[in-house]
Image (cartoon, rainbow, N blue to C red):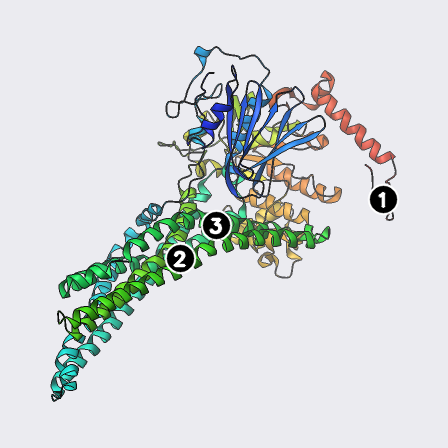
Amino acid sequence: MQEHPTALADPHPQWPALQTKLLPGENVAAPLEVDLDAELHFARGLLTLTNRRLLAWEPSTRAWTEWELRPELSVRISDHAGVGLLELVDGRGRLATWRFTLQMTLQAQRWQEAFEKRDEPPRESAEDVSYCPSCKAPLPPDSEECPTCERELHTPPSTWVLLRLWRFAYPYRGQLLSGFLLMLGAMGATLVAPYLTMPLMDKVLIPFQQGHHIEPGIVAVYMGGLFAAALVSWGLGWGKTYILALVSERIAADLRTATFEHLLGLSLEYFGSKRTGDLMSRIGSETDRISVFLSLHALDFVTDVLMLMMTSVILFSINPWLALATLVPLPFIAWMIHLVRDRLRTGFEKIDRVWGEVTSVLADTIPGIRVVKAFAQEKREALRFREANRHNLALNDKLNKTWSLFGPTVTMLTDMGLLIVWAFGIWLVAGQSITVGTLTAFLAYIGRFYGRMDSMSRIVSVTQKAAAGAKRIFDILDHQSNVPEPTQPLELQGVKGGIQIRDIGFRYGNRAVIRGLSLDIRPGEMIGLVGHSGSGKSTLVNLICRFYDVTEGGISIDGTDLRRIKVADYRRHIGLVLQEPFLFFGTIAENIAYGKPEATREEIVAAARAAHAHEFILRLPQGYDSLVGERGQGLSGGERQRISIARALLINPRVLILDEATSSVDTETEKEIQKALDNLVKGRTTIAIAHRLSTLRKADRLVVMDRGQVVEVGQHDELMENKGHYWRLYEAQARRVDAEDAEPVALPNPNAHTVQV
């Protein structure tokens, strides 16, 4: 039996058991670890493809399941609501399912590819196989990146991640030092009162009980000392709390700003794998949690540690034997903190993720409320929210079981320690080893000692919450954009708009979308991109806009590679008009001037006139100052589109991208938009995508794409004469239009239960 080098960076606990289950001559071909069980709880499952079988370790049943490899077996991958689903199916139906978080999608896709290619002969000899230098796992063909090392492992957040907040706290180090000094002063003042109780007991109260006269002056001195200590402690404590509250809010604000700015700098690929609600939760809720931790608990923990140390010194100076008795519960409390900390750490991270799901339901439903109401799906969305909320509640209940037991147990241990001190202290007083005043002062210090110990134990909870939140924020800050800025950018001056595309390739995960594509676009030329859905038109436009970077080849503008130009400098020369125009909440004028905020009212009006939007804007109650609802609610689709055209006109771009700009409007509105587009394309390099081929007749050249490649280039009449891909597309579209005009529209029967299309 050949031992396979594991492709798991952190070996699965069942890996040794797997080795014992392999038959003679059976070798592991591809292992995959899934991180969710059937109930969507975090659990480590293991799928293993061998040259004979598929073996699966189920964490919920703690048992192995196996299937013999048959030709009809296949694997499907899908995702829903942030959870990936892997299905094993055959000709009769589904045999098994496994679930995983979306961070493991790439590994699942590669495992699926290995499963589907299990019967293919190897394309390379053993000598040609490359291995990762770190984990020694075999690398995928034509790849220099190890999927195992590249995968972001689901590891519990470490408390040490909180130290990374220092980069945000460093600018406020002066205020933090002031708060720390005030804290030391307040802490020292609180230690004065118990020390004054010793002479008050031994020199005033006990002698009075023995018949001696009380000296008012001595009593006044001691009472004045107690009052002064309380007053000083209050004043210094107030100053410390105020300074730390100000600093923590500023640190949290800087953290929010830095996270949001970094998020804006990431490529579209990152946003494609994240949910809006989860990102909103990280920037909002997590930073608030960190602010509370910094303002209320961070220095409190330091205060508790220093107080314990100083109190311990005083206790040992008063009586070493009593001090040792005080420390009896300490090892038990430390053991409990260590035991509970790991459970809290993982628990809070799970709660954060589930809370992101709750927020995501809101982020999905509220913007799409029109669709929800149109299809009468209010109950369905309410059920989705209820289920997400139920999952959140279940995790909180599970965590609270641990936490609710921890707090009272610590209190019980400290009470037991106090009883030990009382018993031992009475024995020492009876033996005249210490005085009653000494025991009284000792008990006062003991109260502070155990109080601080109890406070430290309760800080464990908020510390783990803050650590979980900090990890989720630093996951964003640590993510590097797939569209990096050049180290030595070139200046982009005198842009003419010529675009050169040289043998480019691009992949979405393992799926090749663009392959070996080359195209030259002359300055001022209008190019029409046509092809079936999924042929790569929108991907090519995204690459030209540099929303993504090519994986092979290169794209240049006027002979300069896009990767050598600052992204913002390049995109200032690009105007984008999308099929579904996005308008921000604000006035009409602010939306038109979005790409050029410093534009004058005259420039805004001129752009609106050129976009044929001026007339309908003037009919609005406040004209250009009329408020546009979120996502342009209150305006028709054609009106939103003309505002987006005016927005593109205002920045006067050299390169114009039109992505289905007229596909979602009626014929009359299309004519108005087409007039605006005629003004927009004059003198600009234009790349237009349209499913209605008739709208591209004005293009200088038509570029026909199929399966990520350019298959035809030419003008309309020329391509029609060739009777190739374009001719077939045009004829199919013409037949479909004729059929729609000839056939009457069949209205669905309102009494029918099913409608077959």
Compared with 683, 716 (above or below) is above
Front disc: 1 or 3: 3
Compared with 158, 291 (above or below) is below
Compared with 96, 477 (above or below) is below
Dot 3 lies on which element?
A: helix
The residue beneath circle 3 is 352
Give the residue type that dot 2 points to.
Phe
Give the residue type that dot 3 points to.
Asp
The residue beneath circle 2 is 406
Picture coordinates of residue 371, whole percent (x, y): 69, 50
Give the residue type that dot 1 points to.
Pro
Image point (73%, 17%), residue name: 723
The residue beneath circle 1 is 748
Dot 1 lies on which element?
A: loop
Image point (14%, 73%), residue name: 435
Front disc: 2 or 1: 2
Picture coordinates of residue 127, whole percent (x, y): 43, 11
Picture coordinates of residue 423, whole percent (x, y): 24, 68
Tag 3: Cα neighbours inside 10 Å, few (<14), some, or many (≥20)? Answer: many
Q: Which is nearer the eye, 529 or 17?
A: 17
Task: Measure how far apart labels 3 and 2 are at the Cα level.
Answer: 21 Å
Image point (47%, 23%), residue name: 19
**CB atoms at circles 3 and 2 under 8 Å apart?**
no
Which corner quadrant holds the C terminus? top right
